[in-house]
């Protein structure tokens, strides 16, 4: 892949076929998508205009970006501000491209696999490794999990997460919550509270293929509980979940 950088914007082509759907119909379908890092954390899809099936309707509104220029906003099939384009962008690669707002679409696919939350970053890696390390979790001084068969998930840019069998967790101390989150690399998670502290614990019942080894296992926020690994208390990491 040839990567270019324009100011704070990184641009890279992808060979993946990417599709966006709205109202059960294809809005865009392309094997010539650009990945554009508008923010450092993950990319956004930019489609060639000729690969857009639903012709966007200009609505007269604009949005300014210091790096990308003046964006023209479009409505798509009755959804306001669902797409934008930078026809006069100082970044030439973007001028004949259309970007759709993620939440405005009903679903997104890379090839035939649905993608959730945001586009996947090709430089984010997820490794799930079986381990024999002794992991013990305390919440407010009470041991709520004690396992010698964790699976440790290593994800680029995040602290390691210890996924434990439910048989090694005091599930009687956990109360399910209504919280549901989605991750583009792991899938949909359900949550529990502990001792009145909400959403400290989560699990993926049916994770995506690359994270299937954590199916049905339970993990705790390292940032919010005390985790001992081989009897050594781990420092609570500083992250966006702290």
Image (tube, rainbow, N blue to C red):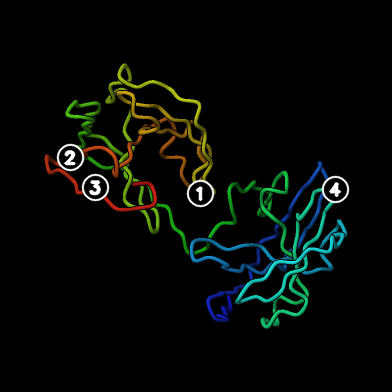
* Horizontal relation, residue 119 to residue 57: left or right: left
* Horizontal relation, residue 223 to residue 71: left or right: left
Give above or below for 84 relative to 68.
above
Distance from label 4 to label 3 (Cα)? 47 Å
Instruction: Give the labeled residue for mark 1.
Output: 185
> Disc 4 or 1, which lies upstream in sequence?
4
Q: Given the current orientation, which residue lies at the most extreme left position?
A: 231
Distance from label 2 to label 4 (Cα)? 53 Å
Q: What label does residue 193 carry, if any?
A: none
Measured as percent of width and height from the top left, residue 181 is found at: 51, 38
- Which one is nearer the viewer's eye here, 224 or 120? 224
Kindly report which numbered mark, 4 or 1, lies closer to the viewer in this rendering: 4
Circles 1 and 2: CB distance less than 8 Å? no
SS for callout 4: loop
> Disc 1 or 2, which lies upstream in sequence?
1
Q: What label does residue 236 carry, if any?
A: 3
Kindly report which numbered mark, 1 or 2, lies closer to the viewer in this rendering: 2
Q: What label does residue 228 carry, if any?
A: 2
SS for callout 3: loop
Distance from label 1 to label 2 (Cα)? 26 Å
> Disc 4 or 3, which lies upstream in sequence?
4
Distance from label 2 to label 3 (Cα)? 11 Å
**Could you tell me which residue is drawn at 37 percent across and 32 percent down?**
201
Instruction: Give the labeled residue for mark 4.
Output: 78
SS for callout 2: strand
Give above or below for 201 relative to 232.
above
Give above or below for 86 relative to 172.
below
The image quarter in which residue 172 lies: top left
Instruction: Categorize mark 2 by other alpha carbons within 10 Å: few (<14), some (14-19), many (20+).
Output: some
Instruction: Categorize mark 1 by other alpha carbons within 10 Å: few (<14), some (14-19), many (20+).
Output: many
> Disc 3 or 1, which lies upstream in sequence?
1
Measured as percent of width and height from the top left, residue 15 is found at: 65, 67
């Amino acid at each position: 892949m040839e990567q270019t950088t324009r100011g704070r914007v990184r641009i890279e082509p992808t060979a993946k076929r990417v599709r966006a759907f709205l109202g059960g119909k294809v809005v865009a379908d392309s094997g010539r998508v650009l990945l554009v890092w508008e923010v450092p954390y993950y990319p956004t899809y930019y489609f060639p205009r000729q690969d857009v099936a639903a012709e966007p309707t200009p609505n007269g509104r604009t949005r300014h970006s210091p790096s990308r220029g003046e964006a023209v906003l479009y409505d798509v099939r009755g959804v306001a501000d669902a797409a934008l384009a930078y026809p006069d962008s100082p970044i030439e690669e973007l001028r004949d491209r259309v970007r759709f707002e993620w939440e405005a679409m009903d679903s997104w696919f890379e090839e035939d696999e649905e993608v959730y939350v945001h586009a996947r970053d090709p430089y984010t890696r997820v490794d799930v490794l079986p381990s024999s390390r002794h992991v013990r979790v305390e919440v407010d001084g009470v041991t709520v999990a004690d396992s010698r068969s964790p699976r440790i998930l290593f994800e680029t840019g995040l602290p390691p997460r210890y996924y434990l069998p439910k048989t090694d967790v005091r599930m009687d101390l956990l109360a399910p919550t209504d919280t549901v989150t989605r991750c583009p690399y792991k899938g949909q998670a359900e949550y529990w509270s502990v001792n009145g502290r909400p959403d400290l614990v989560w699990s993926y019942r049916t994770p995506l293929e690359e994270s299937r080894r954590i199916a049905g296992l339970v993990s705790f926020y390292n940032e919010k509980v005390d985790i001992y690994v081989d009897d050594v208390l781990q420092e609570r990491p500083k992250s966006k979940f702290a």
